[in-house]
Image: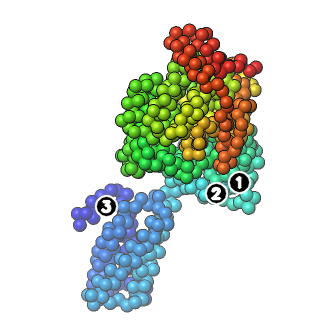
Amino acid sequence: MLKIFEKIKNHKIFMLFLLDFIIWNISFYLSFAINKNSFSLIGFEGLFLECVLVVNVCFTVIFMTFKTYDRIWRYAEIEDFFYAGVSIIFSNFLFFIFTFLKNKNLGIRMYVLFLLISEFLNFMSRVIYRVNILLENSEKINKIHKKRLLIVGAGEVATMILREISRNPNNEYLPIYIVDDDRNKIGRSISGIKVKGSVYEIPQICANENIAIILFAIVNIKKNDKERILDICSKTSIEVRIVPNIYETLTKGNLISSIRHVKIEDLLGREPVIFDSKNYAKYIKNKNILVTGGGGSIGSELCRQIAGLNPKNLIILDIYENSAYEIQQELYRKYILNKRGDLKFEVQIASVRDIDKIDKVFLEKKIDVVFHAAAHKHVPLMEENPEEAVKNNVFGTLNVALISEKYKIDRFVLISTDKAVRPSSVMGATKRICEMIIQLMAQKTKNTKFTAVRFGNVLGSNGSVIPLFEQQIKEKGPVTITHPEITRYFMTISEAVSLVITAGSISKGGEIFVLDMGEPVKIKDLAENLIRLSGFVPNKDIEIKFVGLRPGEKLYEELLLDEEDISLTENKKIYIGNPIKFDTKKFELDLEVLKKTCNSNNHELIKKNISKIVPIVKNQT
C-alpha cells in the first residue's frame, strides 16, 4: 500500500486517481441498480458494500500494475486511451474472478453492464480532461505574443509540425494557414488549420494575414520545384524557415527544434550530386588511411566519411591542434562513447613541411592510402605571403608525395581547386604546381596511383563567402560583394568529399577528376535571395556593397584547361582531365630554384619564379 500512496502523492496524480475512484463506484452503482431494476439498495446493502470494496481493490491493483498514472494525460494519444481501456477490462475480469470464487455471482447481465459503463465513463473523463488541456493551451497561445506562421506543404511534415505545436504551448509559432500545390487539398483542414490556397497565393496571404514567418515544410521535393517555391517566398520579404530532412530532425531530438533558416544549399540551381561511396570505397576497408589537413573543413569531412567505411586505422594529421582536437572528439563521441561502430583512429600533430616527421608517421603507421587536404587556401592572404603558400602547398605536397613513393603506398589523392585553372593568384598557381607534382609522380612510379581532384567553392568550408554573408545579414549589413558580375561554381562539403573518395577508387594514375557542377551561380543573385529569405529587402533593409575584386581574385572560375583532354567516367557526373604533357626535367629544375628562393621572403622574386612554372594571369575586370 505504501507504493500506491507514493504514486498518488503528486497533486495531479491524486486528483486523477480520485476521479477514477468516483467513476468506479458510480459505474458499479448504476450497473447494480439497472440490473435490479431499482435505484434503491434496501435489502441489498451488505452485498453492495462487499462488492464495492472488491471493485475498488481490483481496480486500484490493476491500474497501478498497468502504470496508468505514469502516463501524462495532457499529451495523451490513442495508445494511452487504449491501455486505459485494457486496464478497465482486466479490472472487470479480476472483479468477476473474486466474486465468482466468493460465490457472489451477480449474473452475466450485471458484469456486462459494469464493463460497458465503467469503460464509457473512464474514456469520457480522459477525453474531457484532454480537451480541457487543449483549450487551456489555446488560451495561453492567444495571450502570448506568437509569430504568425504560414506553412508551405499540406503533407505529413505539416501534420507533425502542427501536432508538436499543440503539445508545446511555449513555442514561438502561431499557425494561421497552410498552402499547397495540390488543388484537392485546398479548403480542407489539418489539425484545425485550413489549407487556404496554392503556393502562388503566398504573397497575397502574407499581406492579408500579417504573416511573420513562412515555414517550408516539404521534405521530399524536386530541386526545381523547391527553387520555384522559395523564389515565390522571396518576393514577400518575409523570413523563410525550413524543415530540413529526417536525419537533421532525428539529431535535433524533435521537429520544432530542427526548423532552421534557409541555407545556400537550398538555393543551388541544380540537383545535388549523390555518390555511392560504399561501392567505390573497397580500397579503404581494413587499410591504414592518412588524411593530411584532417582538421580542416574538407579534411574533417573526409575523416567523417572514411570513418564509416571500416578503415583499419584512420590517422588524422594536422598542424593546427584545435581543429584536429574537434574532429577527434566528434569521432570519439560517435564511435567510442556511443558505440555506433568499431573505429580505430588517432591524431598526429605535424606539418607537411616537416619531411622527417612525415617519414616517421608513414613508417610507424604503415600507411596504405593518403588523402592530401593540407593547404593554405585563402587567396588574398597568400598574395601577401607567397613564401608560405610555396612552402606549405608546393613543398608540403612534394614531401608527402615523395614519402608515399618511398613506402610504395597504394593510392595518393590530392585535393585541388578550380583556382588552379589559368590561375590569377599565388594560391591558385601553387595548387596548379601541386597538380603537376602529382602528374610527375604518376609518371615516375607504378607502385602508387597518384591522382588529383579539382572542384569549385565548397559551401560552409573555412573561408567560404557564405558564412560571411550570413554574419553580415545577422549584423544588418552591409553585405559585401567584390563585383556585380562575379560568378562561382558551388558544391556541398559532402559532395566534394564523396567525389574525392570515388576518384581514389577509379584512378589509374595521373588524372585530374572534375565534378559536373552545373551552371555557375552569380554571387549577387545568391546574396539577394539569402537576404530576402531572411526576411529583409535588399538595398532597403540591408545594403549590398560592391568592394572590388581582391588581389588574385577571378571574376569567373573555370574547371578545365583548354589543353586538358576531357573524358567522362562511367559515373556520368565525374569528368577526367587527362595529363598535360610538360618538360619534367625543366619542371624539376624550376622547383629547385623555387625552393631556394622561398626562404628569401622576397615576394617579387618568389612570384617571378612561380610564374616561370605556371603563368599567373591578371585579374579579370
Q: Earlier in the sequence, mark 1 or mark 3?
A: 3
How crowded pointer 3 is (Cα within 10 Å; few <14, some 14-19, many 20+) is rated as: some
The alpha-carbon separation of the residues under discs 1 and 2 comes to: 9 Å
* Nearer the camera: disc 2 or disc 3: 2
The x, y position of residue 187, in whole percent, is 72, 59
Check whether the beta carbons of the residues at disc 2 and disc 3 lie within 8 A of each other: no
Q: Nearer the viewer, residue 322 or 535?
A: 322
Query: Mark 2 highlights which residue?
Result: 155
Q: Nearer the viewer, residue 76 or 225?
A: 225
The alpha-carbon separation of the residues under discs 1 and 3 comes to: 48 Å
Instruction: Say which amino acid is labelled 2.
Output: Gly
Q: Horizontal placement of 485 versus 584: left or right?
A: right
Query: Mark 1 highlights which residue?
Result: 180
Q: Earlier in the sequence, mark 2 or mark 3?
A: 3
Q: Residue 420: which quarter of the image?
A: top right
Q: Horizontal placement of 352 versus 2: left or right?
A: right
Determine whether 607 is above or below 12 in the image: above
Q: Secondary structure at mark 2?
A: loop
* Nearer the camera: disc 1 or disc 3: 1
- The numbered disc on residue 93 is none
Q: Nearer the viewer, residue 605 or 58?
A: 605
Query: Mark 3 highlights which residue?
Result: 8
Tell me which residue sits at (50%, 39%) in the image.
Answer: 447
